[in-house]
Image: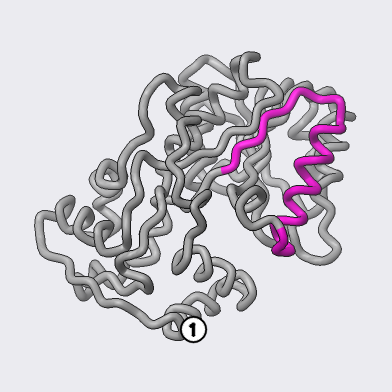
Amino acid sequence: MIVVTGATGNIGRPLTQELVEAGQQVTAVSRHTAAVPNGARHMVADLAEPAGLRPALAGAKALFLLLSGDLHSTGASPADIIGEAAAGGVRRVVLLSTLGVATRPFGPTRIAMRALEDTLRESGLDWTVLRPGGFASNALWWAESVRTQRVVAAPFGDVGVPIIDPADIAAVAAACLLDDRHTHGVHELTGPEVITPRQQAEAIAGALGSPVSFHELTRDEAKAAMTRTMPAELADDTLDILGSPSPAELRVSPDVERVLGRAPRPFDDWATRNVAAFR
């Protein structure tokens, strides 16, 4: 049995599907009742209360651990999830971390994630850490404006980073859960090329077969929009990366190809597969 947390999201859902198709028994865990891929068992649990995971972890051999942002808040104890996994007999944990642990290690969220990585390393379990950069699926922030106005509004229109398709993160996670060769590895996951917001808008237009204009926001305008759904500190942190990526954040990592034996998917592939969100 393999337990997948965050099983209804952009990474967890394709990961669950891939594991089921590989013939694995999968317990898909989410905070709320939701549909999961056929063949998986669904359980509701709140990772903010690690003891609630015990029924899901019973009899499991491996765990994919994806934490929501609130699990890094004051009073949260995600390290206890590692303890529950070990106590429940889990032998392997694949942790979704973030590239920022290496590139910008001093923000509060990344300090907490680094501590969780260290807890996992010291747990005695087999482990793999995945550190993705920006996600292609963040383009879904533009879905409503594209549907209603055929416009993408974003800051730093001509500054790019090598964003990754969440389906590629899922594929790497599946390989690490199923193959001992990836034990005790840290994989930095990026897409195949640096791509700017303006170029993403062009790819979405190509997928739609109709023009999409680009409107460049100021940093202040972007922050005002972002703080409707995230803390101001996290918005500033994200804008720092988007506006002035470091050489390490511009680097195209070879790790997806090393694990999967193929190159990561480009953004236009993601846009084509997800075009319905923008129609």
Give whichever of 204, 9 is nearer the camera.
Answer: 204
> Which residue type does callout 1 highlight?
Ala
Give coordinates of residue 86: x percent, y percent: 85, 29
Residue name at image x 50 percent, y 23 percent: 259
Q: Residue at x 10, y 60 (%)?
A: 210
Q: Nearer the viewer, residue 142 or 47?
A: 142
Is residue 119 covered in magenta? yes
Q: Secondary structure at mark 1?
A: helix
250 horizontally vs 107: left or right: left
Magenta part of the chain: 106-131
Closer to us: 119 or 27: 119
**Circle 1 residues within 10 Å: few <14, some 14–19, many ≥20:** few
Lateral position of residue 47 relative to residue 229, left or right: right
Q: How is the image coloured?
A: one colour
Where residue 207 appears, as percent x and y from the top left, is 18, 50
Q: In the rendered image, which residue does mark 1 sit on?
A: 224
Which image quarter is the N terminus in?
top right
